[in-house]
Image: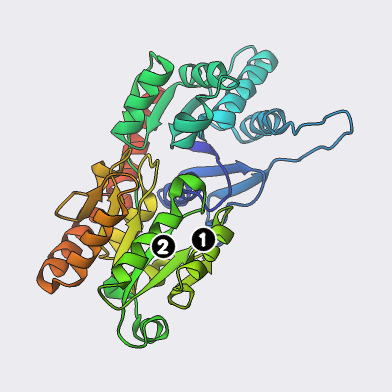
Amino acid sequence: MKIAIVCYPTYGGSGVVATELGKYLATRGHEIHFISYAMPHRLSEFVDNIFYHEVESYNYPLFEFPLYSIELASKIAEVVKYNDVELIHAHYAIPHATSAYLAREILKKERGKCNVKVVTTLHGTDITLIGLEPTFLPTMKFSIEQSDGVTAVSNFLKEKTITAYKVEKEIEVIPNFIDIEKYNRDTIKICNLKNHFAPNDEKILVHTSNFRPLKRVQDVIKIFFEVRKKINVKLLLIGDGPERSECEHLSRELGIYEDVKFMGKQDSIAELLCLSDLFIMPSQSESFGLSALEAMSCSVPAITSSVGGLPELNIHGETGYIAEIGDIERMAKYAVELLTNEKKYKLFSKRARERAMEFSMENIIPLYEKHYEKILSS
């Protein structure tokens, strides 16, 4: 198949999933055309059958606001036209599915007909946050319904889409996936790195996010503060974003700044996850929880909030623990319980890895191929 993948190039989950999906599909013989405003950060190496098309941005004084959706539509139409693309896979409904629809209409006008199909994958904030704004809601609903195929990364997100937008469209749940060989504690040497972060054999808590308010990173610091009262621990915070300065201020205010390591954005976090003992995700909203899956694949149990798709991934009392949003005391209690009970910890660690293996690329990506085939034959 010849497939155009339209995605954000950023560190966020949707960009990671889209890029890794395209790379894996290319190894299976498909021709993949990535379309975005910048090179996806996971597309750092040459892969045969992969092509990148950058959306050109045009600035003109009359246009006070960016016109990316229109520019993107033109680029999609161009890529489809000159590369005989059969299917456009849009990751995020707004603006990507909207632009894909417009591109298809442009090609219909040029050719008299256009057989290219559009598959839209819903990842989260497009549905749970942005799309619910009155400004976007009609366009969101229209873009989803005009797609030939629609997938969602969790049952939670599927049901949220149907109820919030009154969408009369079949939505197939295809969860996020992971390279279980890359995120594997058994194959990564961490001795020297572990000694660097925990020279006195302290336990290590870890959190990964874009430091936006809904990730509740300050809760992570407060949980760490409570755990630190009971056992010797360190905290690794991976990522960057608008809340970072407030988080640094909070850690200084609590007198724990020396034990909190702000790592910033990292291209490869497998090593950092593999040297960690617990993953903390107290988010206010998570449609799936890809970073939790990455940690679990590294045999790191997760302590998460009970929101969104997280309970579909993290099994309470088996792969980690789940608590209500903002329940810092309970999350800290769960952390201490696991870190002070070696037998239980080893069992949770083993089960976390086993659970992650269910979401391997080999298990999940063929589901996308089957979905493509169904849409193309419809």
Q: Name the amino acid type tagged 1.
A: Cys
**Looking at this view, is 173 or 295 the one in front?**
295
| Rendered residue at 63%/15% (across/down) | 108
On the rendered structure, is 158 left or right of 111?
Answer: left
Image: 116 above or below 25: above
In the current view of this chain or complex, which residue is farthest to the left? Answer: 343
- Rendering coords of residue 302 (x, y %): 27, 57
| Rendered residue at 31%/39% (across/down) | 309
In the current view of this chain or complex, which residue is farthest to the right? Answer: 61
Q: CA distance from mark 2 to mark 1?
A: 8 Å
Secondary element at image label 1: helix
Residue matched to label 1? 247
On the rendered structure, is 325 left or right of 21?
Answer: left
Q: Name the amino acid type tagged 2.
A: Ile
Sooner in the amino-acid sequence: mark 2 or mark 1: 2
Residue matched to label 2? 221
Tell me if residue 87 can be seen. Answer: no
> Pointers 2 and 1 in contact (CB under 8 A)?
yes
- Rendering coords of residue 222 (x, y %): 38, 61
Circle 1 packing at 10 Å, graded few (<14), some (14-19), many (20+), is: many
